[in-house]
Amino acid sequence: MAGLTPQYVLRRLGMFLLTIWLGATIIFIIPRLAPGDPVAAMVSRLTAQAGYIENSAEIIAAWRERFGLDGPLWVQYLAYMRNMLTLDMGYSLSSFPSRVDEMIFSALPWTVGLLSVSTILSFLAGNAIGALMGWPRVPRWIRALLPTSLTFTSIPFFMLGILLVYLFAYELRWLPPTGAYGRGLTPGWNWPFIKSVIEHGILPVLSIVVTSMGFWALGMRGMIITNQGEDYMILAEAKGLRPSRIFLRYGVRNSILPQVTALALSLGGIAGGSTLVEYIFAYPGMGYLLYQGIVNTDYTLIQGIVFMLILGTATAVLILDLLLPVLDPRISYER
């Protein structure tokens, strides 16, 4: 690939592995700082349901040994890192005998679909609005109208989600309030199921897009204004090129590179914000699963989900770093 050197690729791979190791270590430590014992909490829930459980102390000791929680912390850490390297995340503490990897892979397609659609729409809409706001030849009435589209930027994802549910699900009754598809439907490549998935996904996607596109719009507006005084812009105008060509090929193309870089860095924040969105809409994604793991003090489930989020974000950053020379030929890591 033009512009890349083996040294740079190896350095980026080293940073990629270091990021994953640090993230995995942090998510091992943080759940164990919380008070309480996950196995004792699980037995307490069973006791509350059944009224009485005989030999509860022996059950707790046996389950702690079964999940590897009876050994020293460093032994637990080594076993945990070995399992993360092999993607063998063990059994869920709160949903035994369900395996964590099976639970994650069943929820992963819903989160990937939700985040990919909402991120792409937010990125495209925000950058289009920002480019039009910063371009001086745009009609004045459009430039006055566009900032109103950024009114909801300061509202958190989940707050706008509550507002959308109240307005479109309960008042207007246009869209379903919760879930990923209607009851009684069989998942598959059939139109009733696909139509139901689209209808159930509109409100979660809209809550993320409307609140996040302002970030892209403000960044793109600043880049467009900065590039207006560059020599290549003045030369393009002096050559008599069409304003639309100058806007797209010279203005937008040279302003989009920092936005693409910020896109990878923002994926972690979008994934974190979608957790509450999925909880509000009862959307069966990884965010909703993570909420259940936190409520039930499920160490293995929390570690598995957050590790997959860290792995996905770090991979996206690595790919975009390697693609930067393709997006902008001026970037080269050769000496």
Image (cartoon, rainbow, N blue to C red):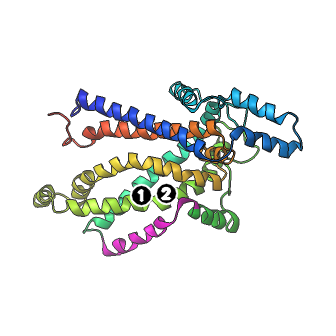
Is the magenta region chiefly helix, strand or loop? helix
Q: Amino acid at mark 1?
A: Ala
Instruction: State which quadrant residue 8 falls in.
Output: top left
Residue under pointer 1: 125
Residue situated in front as seen by the camera: 229 or 264: 264
Answer with the quarter of the image where residue 284 lies.
Answer: top right
3D distance between C-alphas at marks 1 and 2: 9 Å
Q: Residues within 10 Å of mark 2 (few under 14, many from 20)?
A: many
Is residue 137 part of the magenta span, yes or no?
A: no
In this picture, is 251 found above or below 104? below
Q: Position of residue 88 (x, y in %)?
A: 58, 26
Foreground label between 1 and 2: 2
Q: Position of residue 287 (x, y in %)?
A: 59, 47
Amino acid type, label 2: Val
Asked if the residue under mark 2 is in contact with the one under mark 1, i.e. CB atoms within 8 Å, the reply is yes
Image coordinates for residue 309, horizontal then vertical, percent: 51, 41
From the image, tell me which residue sits under label 2. Answer: 209
Bounds of the magenta span? 139-158
Q: Residue furthest front?
A: 72
| Residue situated in front as seen by the camera: 263 or 194 | 263
